[in-house]
Each structure stands twice: as C-alpha cells, then as structure tokens.
Amino acid sequence: MSVGHDLDEHRRRNLATVESAFAAIGRGDAEGQLANYVDDLVLEFPFTDPPKSVRGKTEALPYLGGAFGVFRFELTIDDVIACVDPDRLVIEAHSTGTYLPTGAAYENRYVIVFGFRDGLIATQREFFDPTQAARSAGTFPA
C-alpha cells in the first residue's frame, strides 16, 4: 500500500523519519531506532498494565533493547493521517514477527501519534493490544 503520497514536503520528511525508525525496529536495533529521536524524547504506552512512559534516550535504550531481546517484528504502515500541526502525524500500522524465546508468531495492530521537533521524533504515543504479546508468550488464553 502506498501511503503518504499526498503529504507536503515537511510531513513527508517526518514520515521518512518514522520509516527509518521502523526499519531499525525490524532489525532489532534500538540504537538505530533512537537515532531518529530527540535526546529528550517521550514514549508513551497508555494500554500497557500499568501504563508506561519512557523519557529520554538514556531510559529508552535499555527499555527498547529489552523488548527487542524477546520480540523481533516488522512494522508496516497502513495509513498516515496528517494533522493540522505539520509536526504531528498519526500512523496506523501492523506488525508481523516472532516471540523469540519460543518462536511463536507475534502480530499486532497499532495507532501511533508522533510529534516531531527539527525533523526528529520527540513524542510517540503508541496504542496497541498488549494481550497479543501475552498470547505469543503463552501467558494469555488464545
């Protein structure tokens, strides 16, 4: 699916930053992902139990590295919603991958609200179904 073709140059630049971050996620490369973020980034996961906020690259690197140690997946962008603010994009995406400890399949759907500063990701509010990860890990009924 071709997404983002009707965006202006500023928003296309921001979308390219997201695509670069997603490519690093697919490689399980936390440092590569964070190269697309400002130093004082804020990652928010409102649907985790309890909800989680990660602030700054120093906190984000071990958090993401831990996640990539158990999950390996690719994110595919399904839709891009441009906001009035050119430094905000809403991305709908889906993932396909593996829960590494068991080799179980992992799939999920996401709505992610990105905020940008100077062409880098400053905020990321990620809505996903945390029960899908638990299902892959075998800790949630199928």
Image: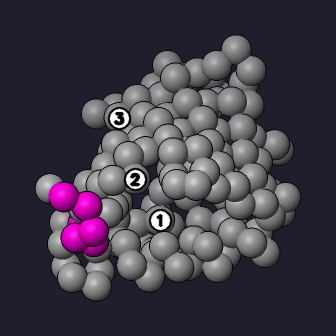
Where is residue 5? Give x, y as percent.
46, 25
Residue 3 drawn at (x, y percent)? 40, 30
Please, what secondary structure does the residue beneath circle 1 have? helix
Picture coordinates of residue 37 (x, y %)?
A: 72, 57
Placement of 109 over or under 42, stated as above or below: above
Q: Earlier in the sequence, mark 2 or mark 3?
A: 3
Q: Which residue is mark 3?
A: 78
Label 2, label 1: how many angstroms apart (C-alpha)? 17 Å
Mark 1 crowd level (few <14, some 14–19, many ≥20, 10 Å Cα): many
- The answer to which quarter of the image holds residue 103 is bottom left
Left or right: 14 as drawn, with respect to 137? right
Residue 34 falls inside the magenta stretch: no
- Measuring 78% from the left and 75% from the top, which residue is drawn there? 58
Q: Residue at x 74, y 31 (%)?
A: 87
Residue underneath mark 1: 25
Mark 3 is surrounded, within 10 Å at the Cα level, by few (under 14), some (14 to 19) or many (20 or more) other residues, namely: some
Does 65 sit above or below residue 108? Answer: below
The amino acid type of the residue labelled 3 equals Asp
Could you say whether the residue bearing mark 2 is in a helix, strand or loop?
helix
Residue found 83% across the figure and 44% down from its top: 118
Reading the image, the residue beneath label 2 is 130
Judging depth in this view, the residue of 109 and 134 nearest the camera is 134
- What is the C-alpha distance between the residues marked 1 and 3? 16 Å
Residue range in magenta is 136-141
Q: CA distance from mark 2 to mark 3?
A: 19 Å
In terms of depth relative to the viewer, which is nearer, 131 or 21? 131
Q: At x 68% / y 30%, what residue is drawn?
A: 88
Q: Nearer the viewer, mark 2 or mark 1?
A: 2
Q: Tell me the quarter of the image containing the N terminus.
A: top left
Q: Amino acid at mark 1?
A: Ile
